[in-house]
Image (tube, rainbow, N blue to C red):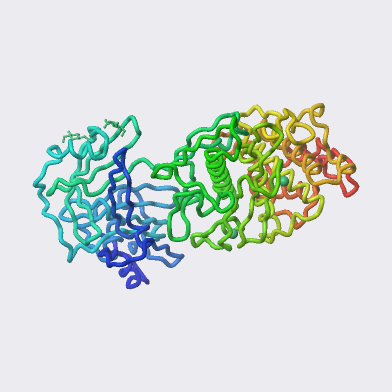
């Protein structure tokens, strides 16, 4: 066994073992980190599961070191992890290897606690190493010295109680081998359990049942299926006629580690969460069934204000803005980069500024808007009803409009450091409108074949949408260029020029580098649509306050230099120059096609 030099030894011995005996009364939220009550099946059986409180510690450069001086390779990861964990005060014979792997210079090890060789299902630890240094560890190990531990020999077989368990969980045993494991309970005892998988292939339910091996009772479950579901217009679809779908667990836990429904120390069961509050008047939409099921089905043959439609609209706004939060987080719009969150989960930046989206807002029709105050104050998105058709249509069921609005929040926060003061000139305000359309365009391109793009077609009930021409690489379809700015003096019109330039940049990058369908979650992909969004987002933080078109273009080139070592400079520059924003374009707004040495 190796030893660890460990300057903080006495500090973390105290945090390794959870103190798990509950005292009462605790506030309700004190159970969020350790308990979960699930409502199972049509009969709404309630099962509470318990997970000992976990501790997590990260070390800086002077963290514990493997004192042999050897770096950790291959099978020694196993023994090093076990000896590190046992150095925290657990007997090494009570630590059992689970799994581990190497990733570059990092090694990740996962172990579990055991009692006389029988593993404890809910007492686990993980250790991350870098070379011979411990980077961090997490642990839910429990102190079993004083615990009431069940006898190690089962007195009830799981086969004898399986019919009752199957009936209780409304499913069937799936023939996966049962295991015998201990389970730490919240009263401080340790139960001996048979762990048996129960599945229902009709409802897609899939549980591990923990059956007490002495009483035969079902005492806990693992739910393999996460269950939030939203009937919405998927963000890659433009508007309601493309069809709503039920999406299960669309949240991206990298960007939203506590999911979409965490509020302070609690969990909501409504369209209120850490990133977004979606409401009309004072009202949110509540889950339509337990387990975060939001199933209202929009019907556009009825008025938007119909109760079901309103619930569907609030759900869609909640969903779209959360996806916008999650995807933009991956591309750099994080807590420290002034994003919108109720809690920043300890990641810096100012909090208490989740996006408030007012659906069917009464203050207007045939439009939408987004107010972006400084970091630390909520952004407010107002979505209106459109009264061009009968029945009216709801802007919230037109994803390109919501995306456009949320992009105002992203661009106003990333430009100029979160002040909300840096897209205020006519020209930069025009860029702001252009980014909104270009962002929606990016979401709705679904293949390597870049299509012309029209925004607002459904609510405006017009195939040409709400802008003067489709965005296109074809000059006959859209002739806007930098020189057009001489004739334009309104932000949306100016925005069309910029959005059309970005459409051309996008098409050039996708033609050259291809298209990735993983664009929302894989910002490190090398395909053209991902590279485009990297440059889009990076440039926002680089550009000056109240940028001009020329400065915004330069920020794209700088972003490319920084992230891709200039690999896309000529592709990007040629696309801008094809619409008059060449290297010699200046404040006189004359088209220039100069591309230097490209
Ligand atoms: C699956 O669940 C449905 C709905 O609760 C129930 O009707 C059906 O009997 C279950 N199937 C099994 C195999 O238990
Ligand atoms: C399941 O248990 C049987 C009998 O003990 C054993 O032969 C088989 O290898 C086990 N299967 C798996 C996948 O562990
Ligand atoms: Ca913030
Ligand atoms: Zn706008």
Which residue corresponds to the image point at 39% horizontal and 63% vertical from the top-left?
Answer: 57
Q: Is residue 91 left or right of residue 477?
A: left
Percent coordinates x, y for residue 504 in the rendering: 74, 35
Picture residue at 35% right of the left edge, 69% below the top = 6
Q: Nearer the viewer, residue 538 or 366?
A: 366
Image quarter hosting the N terminus: bottom left
Q: Quadrant of residue 353?
A: bottom right
- In depth, the one of 149 and 59 nearer the eye is 149
Q: Position of residue 321 (x, y in %)?
A: 58, 46
What is the quadrant of the C terminus in the image?
top right
Image position, residue 297 (x, y; %) = 51, 34
Q: Is residue 231 visible?
A: yes
Would residue 524 be visible to someone looking at this image? no
- Is residue 374 shown left or right of residue 317? right
Q: Is residue 253 above or below residue 526?
A: below
304 vs 204, nearest the viewer: 304
């Amino acid at each position: 066994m190796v030893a660890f030099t460990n300057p903080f030894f006495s500090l973390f011995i105290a945090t390794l073992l959870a103190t798990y005996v509950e005292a009462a009364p605790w506030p309700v939220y004190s159970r969020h980190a350790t308990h979960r009550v699930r409502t199972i099946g049509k009969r709404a059986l309630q099962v509470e599961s318990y997970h000992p409180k976990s501790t997590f510690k990260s070390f800086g450069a002077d963290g514990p070191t493997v004192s042999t001086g050897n770096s950790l390779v291959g099978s020694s990861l196993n023994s090093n992890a076990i000896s590190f964990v046992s150095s925290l005060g657990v007997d090494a014979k009570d630590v059992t290897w689970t799994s581990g792997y190497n990733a570059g210079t990092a090694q990740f090890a996962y172990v579990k606690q055991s009692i006389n060789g029988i593993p404890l299902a809910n007492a686990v630890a993980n250790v991350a190493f870098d070379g011979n240094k411990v980077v961090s560890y997490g642990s839910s190990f429990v102190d079993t010295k004083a615990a009431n531990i069940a006898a190690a020999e089962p007195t009830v077989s799981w086969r004898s109680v399986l019919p009752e368990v199957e009936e209780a969980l409304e499913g069937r045993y799936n023939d996966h081998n049962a295991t015998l494991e201990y389970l730490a309970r919240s009263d401080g005892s340790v139960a001996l359990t048979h762990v048996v998988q129960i599945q229902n292939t009709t409802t897609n339910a899939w549980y591990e049942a923990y059956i007490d091996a002495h009483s035969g009772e079902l005492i806990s479950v693992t739910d393999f299926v996460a269950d939030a579901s939203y009937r919405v217009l998927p963000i890659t679809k433009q508007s309601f006629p493309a069809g709503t779908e039920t999406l299960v667990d669309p949240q991206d836990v990298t960007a939203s580690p506590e999911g979409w429904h965490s509020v302070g120390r609690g969990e909501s069961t409504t369209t209120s969460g850490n990133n977004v509050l979606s409401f009309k008047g004072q009202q949110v939409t509540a889950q339509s069934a337990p387990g975060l099921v939001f199933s209202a089905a929009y019907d556009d043959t009825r008025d938007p204000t119909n109760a079901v439609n309103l619930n569907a609209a609030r759900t869609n706004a909640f969903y779209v803005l959360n996806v916008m939060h999650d995807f933009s987080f991956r591309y750099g719009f994080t807590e420290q980069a002034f994003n919108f969150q109720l809690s920043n989960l300890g990641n810096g930046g100012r909090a208490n500024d989740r996006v408030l989206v007012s659906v069917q807002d009464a203050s207007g029709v045939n439009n939408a808007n987004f107010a972006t105050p400084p970091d630390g104050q909520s952004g407010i998105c107002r979505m209106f009803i459109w009264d061009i058709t009968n029945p009216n249509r709801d802007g919230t069921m037109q994803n390109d409009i919501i995306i456009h609005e949320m992009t105002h929040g992203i661009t106003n926060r990333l430009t100029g450091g979160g002040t909300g003061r840096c897209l205020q000139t006519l020209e930069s305000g025009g860029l702001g409108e252009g980014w909104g359309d270009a962002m929606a365009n990016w979401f709705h391109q679904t293949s390597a074949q870049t299509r012309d793009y029209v925004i607002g077609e459904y609510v405006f009930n017009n195939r040409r949408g709400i802008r003067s021409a489709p965005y296109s690489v074809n000059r006959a379809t859209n002739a806007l260029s930098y020189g057009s700015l001489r004739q334009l003096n309104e932000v949306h019109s100016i925005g069309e020029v910029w959005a059309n330039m970005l459409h051309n940049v996008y098409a050039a990058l996708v033609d050259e580098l291809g298209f990735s369908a993983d664009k929302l979650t894989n910002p490190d992909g090398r395909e053209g649509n991902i590279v485009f969004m990297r440059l889009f987002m990076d440039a926002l933080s680089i550009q000056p306050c109240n940028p001009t078109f020329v400065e915004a273009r330069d920020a794209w080139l700088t972003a490319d230099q920084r992230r891709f070592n200039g690999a896309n400079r000529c592709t990007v520059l040629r696309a801008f120059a094809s619409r008059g924003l060449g290297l010699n374009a200046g404040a006189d707004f004359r088209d220039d096609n100069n591309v230097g040495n490209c």
